[in-house]
Image: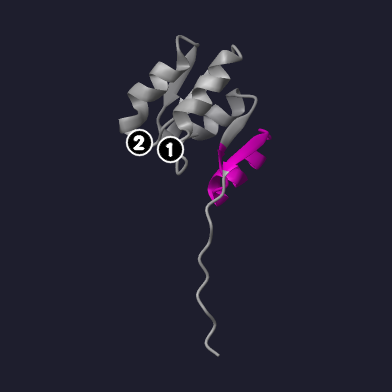
Amino acid sequence: MIHAAKRGAPELVRLLAKLGLDLTVTIGRADELRSEIEAAANGTRRRSLVDERIPRMMHENHLLIGKAGGATVQETIAAKCPMIINHVVAVRRKAMPG
């Protein structure tokens, strides 16, 4: 799942494609990445999905690689789909009045 870590996404897809894996790549709203991702897949069997099919995708795949967003992590747990977290979004905390 490609979200916040867009810069490294084509390289990650390229490396996974070299392993001969079937890939399901979601790009969310990052349409500008579509051609780069397709080129990086280099003929590997892959599917591109839109967000509303994500829960189904998690049940159909063996592993999810993506950011540590709360909803994504909870959905992968519910689907019993292992996850590799490749991007952590830092939480900004407001200073406590003192």
Q: Which mark is residue 30?
A: 2
Q: Secondary structure at mark 2?
A: loop
Q: Position of residue 51 (x, y in %)?
A: 42, 35
Residue at image location 46% in from the left, 17% down from the top: 41
How many C-alpha atoms fall within 10 Å of the one at disc 1: few (<14), some, or many (≥20)? Answer: few
Labels 1 and 2 touching (C-beta < 8 A): yes
Q: Is residue 78 magenta?
A: yes
In depth, the one of 70 and 59 nearer the eye is: 70
Residue at image location 35% in from the left, 38% down from the top: 29
Residue 48 visible in rendering: yes
Q: Position of residue 54 (x, y in %)?
A: 49, 33
Residue type (three-letter) at the residue carrying disc 1: Lys
User: How far separated are the C-alphas under marks 1 and 2?
Assistant: 8 Å
Pick out the residue farthest to the top.
Answer: 43
Q: Which mark is residue 45?
A: none
Of circles 1 and 2, which is in front?
A: 1
Snapshot quadrant of residue 48? top left
- Which residue range is magenta in the image? 66-86
Residue type (three-letter) at the residue carrying disc 2: Ala
Q: Is residue 71 magenta?
A: yes
Q: How is the image coloured?
A: one colour
Residue 22 visible in rendering: no
How many C-alpha atoms fall within 10 Å of the one at disc 2: few (<14), some, or many (≥20)? Answer: few
In depth, the one of 94 and 82 nearer the eye is: 94
Residue at image location 66% in from the left, 33% down from the top: 81
- Which is nearer the N-term, disc 1 or disc 2? 1
Label 1 belongs to which residue?
6
